[in-house]
Amino acid sequence: MAKPNKLYSVLFNKCPRCGEGDFFITKSAYNLKNFDKMNKHCPNCGENLVPEPGFYQGALYMSYAFYVAFMVIYFLIFVNVFPNYLDYFLASIIPILIILTPYFYRLARRSWLALFITPESKKTAS
């Protein structure tokens, strides 16, 4: 396997160190019982995915940034494509953000950890 990529690991629920082990227990952010359950260690390389208590408080700021970026892009698309229907933008933004909450939660946690972990170089054959 080639060197793991941080962007790949963030987008596809993978360990930022090895790029193979799953970060969250379930693949889907919309599993109602386990959307927030994450592995404490990477099942593949053993990397600690919970470095210290309170580590993921910084992910709150990343989540906020994702929400703001999404709302700005959504607004710009709406203004340029449907300029006469801005009331629909206001009516649709809250339900859409509620639906995206589990996805942004997971994305923010994976992004936050990826900032602090360097991907390992190509594995040697064991």
Image: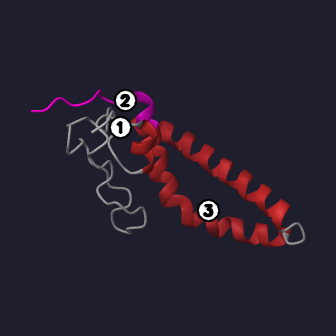
The local crowd at label 3, few if under 14, some if 14 to 19, many if 20 or more residues have their Cα within 10 Å, is: some
Label ID, residue 97: 3
The kind of residue tagged 1 is Pro
Q: Is residue 29 above or below residue 72?
A: below
Which residue matches tag 2?
A: 117
Q: Which residues are magenta?
A: 112-126
Q: Is residue 57 left or right of residue 85?
A: left
The kind of residue tagged 3 is Leu
Residue at 40% over, 51% down:
12
Look at the numbered discs 1 and 2 and tell me whether their residues touch, using CB distance below 8 Å.
yes
Mark 3 or 2: in front is 2
Label ID, residue 122: none
Q: Earlier in the sequence, mark 1 or mark 3?
A: 1
Q: Earlier in the sequence, mark 1 or mark 2?
A: 1
**Which image quadrant: the C terminus?**
top left
Which residue matches tag 1?
A: 16
